[in-house]
Amino acid sequence: MNPKIQAITDRIIERSKPTRQVYLDNIDKAKAETVHRAGLSCGNLAHGFAACGKEDKAKLKGINHSDIAIISAYNDMLSAHQPYESYPAVIKKAVSETGGVAQFAGGVPAMCDGVTQGQPGMDLSLMSRDVIAMATSVGLSHNMFDGATMLGICDKIVPGLLIASFTFGHLPTVFIPAGPMPSGIPNKEKARVRQQFAKGEVGKEELLAAESASYHSAGTCTFFGTANSNQLVVEVMGLHLPGASFVPPNTELREELTKAAARQVTRLTQQSGNYMPVGRMIDERSIVNAIVALLATGGSTNLTMHIIAFARAAGIIINFQDFNDLSDAVPLLTRIYPNGHADINHFEQSGGMALLFKMLIEAELLHEDVETICGRGLSRYTQKPVLEDGQLKWVDGPTSSGDPEVIATVEQPFKTDGGLKVLKGNLGTSVLKTSALREGSTVVEAPAVVFEDQHDLEKAFKAGELEKDFVAVVRFQGPKARGMPELHKLTPPLGVLQDKGFKVALVTDGRMSGASGKVPAAIHLCPEALDGGLIAKVKTGDMISVNGVTGELKLMVSQEELDSRELAQFQVNGHHQGMGREIFGFMRNNLSTADTGACSLFPPLGEGA
C-alpha cells in the first residue's frame, strides 16, 4: 500500500476509535438472529403485510425468507431519477424468484440543483440531504426488513441515503443506479453559449436551445458534477455491482444489472448464511478509497462535505486535512468536464470504472482487501458487465486507456496531485479545487469586492463595474445563514472576466456547483460570516491572497485595523421566507460547520476529535 495513504488511513482509524466502536456496538445490538419481523406482534405483522398478495403473505408469516426494503428517490421531473419508475416491479420480481419478498418501504424527496440554481429553492438544497436521511429512516423504522435497496443518484440524494444506510448499519444494503443520458452537445460549446449570454451576445432563445441540447433525455447529466461523482464513490466503496454506475438507462444491460443487484442483497442477509451488514462492510479503508477515487478523477467538491457527513454516520471521523493530504498522494488520472471536455460517457468508452480500478489497485493507491457487496476484495471491480446470449456476465476490463486525453496513466498523469487544496489563513479554512484551473490562475492576490448575494455580483458585472483584477467575496452564504446554497450563477461572469485576462478569484462561505472549477474559488469557508468569521469584517478594497500553491488564504489587513472593525450583520432580506424556506429554520440553525459536514443530524464532536 502507498505509505502516505496508509499513514492517513491509520490516523483516521486512530481518531475514529471511540465513535467507531460505539457505532459497531449499536449495530450489533440491532441485528436479529432470525428475520426482523419475528420480533413484531401479530398486530404489527398483520399491518406490515396487509396489502401483500397471498404468496408474499405466506412467505412473510414464516421466518425463512428475507424481506427486502426498497427506498426510492423516484420522481419524473428529475431526468436522472425518472428511470426509477419501473425499478420496484423489477426488484420485487427478482427477489421473489430467490424466495424472498421486496416491499416498497418509502419514497424520499429529490430536488434538482439544475432546476433550482440561482432560485430561492436552492437554499433548501443542502438541507434536503438531511431530510432524505430522515425520510429513509422513517421507511426503514418498521423493522420488517432484513436488507435494503437504495435507488438514488443526484447531488444530495445519495449522501442522504448513505447517512441513513449507515444509521441502519445492521442491514445489508445495495445501491442501484440508473445511468447517464446519451451525450448531448459538447460541454465546451455549452459553456461558450453560457458566457455569450452573460456578455449579452446571445438571448434566452439561443441559451435555452443550447441547454436543451445538453440536458435532453432521461438519465444523469453527463458532466462530472456531484451526481456522477456520487456514483463513482458508491461503486468504489463496493456498494454497486461492478461496472454498474455508468450503464445507460432503458437498456437490456441496465435492467439485468438491476435484477442482479436485487438478487445480490438477498445473498447478504442473515437468512442467507452469508450475513454482511453495510455498517461492517464499510470501514475506514472504504472511506479512504472513496476519497482517493474522487481525487484521482477530479470529482465534485460537494463530496468533501458529504463524505465527512456519511462517514460520521458510520462512526468514522474525516476532516478537510485528510482530503488535502490524500490529494498530495494521488495523481489526477482523468479529464472529464469541468476538468476537461469529455463527459462521463466518453470516460466509460475510454475504459471507465474497470480501468480506473485496475490502475489505482496496481499503483497501490486503493485498499484492495476491503469488503464489498460481492465479497472481499476490489479486484472483481476491474471487470465490466456484458450480455452474452441474453445472460449477464462479467469479463475482464480494458488494460489501457482508449483515449489518453480522457484517461491518463499513473506514470504520466494529468497532474501529480489530486487537484484539491485546503487553504488556511487568518480568513479561516476553505477548499480550493485546482484540477480544472488554468496554468497561472492558481495564485490570485487582488483587492476584494464584497457581496452578500450572488445576484448583486451579476448586476455589478452587467454594469461593467468588475473590469479589473479582484477577489469576489460573497458572504453570509454559509450553512447557518442561508443553508449553504450553490453559487453556480457566479461561474459565467467570472469566467468571462478571466477570459479577458483579469485575475479573478472567489472567496465564500457558500458552495460552488460540482460543475465548477475554471475560476479559483476558496469555498466552504469556516468559520462562516454568521458565526463571526473574519470574512464578516472584509471591506471592498482590502487585499486578499488566494494561494493554491502554498495553501494560504490571507486577508492582508493589519490586526490593529481588524480589531477596530465591527462584524457585518446578516441582512435576512426575505432569504428565510418563501419556497418552503420558512419551515427549515430549525434545521438551518443546527447545521454544523462545512468542515464537519454541514450536517444537522449529529451532536458536536468532543475535544480532539
Image (tube, grey):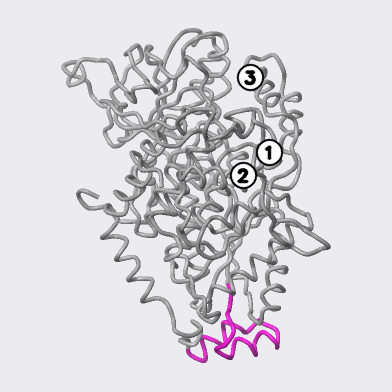
- Alpha carbon separation for disc pair 1 and 3: 29 Å
* Viewer-nearest of discs 3 and 2: 2
Task: Of the two numbered discs 1 and 2 on the same chain, state the one appearing first in sequence.
Answer: 1
State which quadrant residue 178 falls in.
bottom right
Residue 359, how many percent across, how many down? 55, 42
| Magenta stretch in the rendered image | 41-68
Residue 236, how many percent across, how many down? 53, 51
State which quadrant residue 207 falls in.
top right
Residue 299, how many percent across, how many down? 53, 38
* Element type at mark 2: helix
Q: Which residue is mark 1?
A: 350
Q: Residue at x 26, y 33 (%)?
A: 532
- Alpha carbon separation for disc pair 3 and 2: 35 Å
Q: Are marks 3 and 2 in contact (CB under 8 Å)?
A: no
Q: Are marks 1 and 2 in contact (CB under 8 Å)?
A: yes
Q: Amino acid at mark 2?
A: Leu
Q: For the view shown, which residue lies furthest in the right direction? A: 389
Q: Nearer the viewer, residue 326 or 511?
A: 326
Q: Which residue is mark 3?
A: 195
Give the total number of marks visible in the rendering.
Answer: 3
Task: Of the two numbered discs 3 and 2 on the same chain, state the one appearing first in sequence.
Answer: 3
198 in relation to 136, above or below: above
* Element type at mark 3: helix
181 in relation to 65, above or below: above
Q: Nearer the viewer, residue 28 or 114?
A: 28
Q: Residue at x 63, y 19 (%)?
A: 195
Residue 34, how many percent across, how many down? 48, 85
Q: Which residue is mark 2?
A: 355
* Element type at mark 1: loop
Q: Amino acid at mark 1?
A: Ser
Q: Amino acid at mark 3?
A: Gln
Task: Of the two numbered discs 1 and 3 on the same chain, state the one appearing first in sequence.
Answer: 3
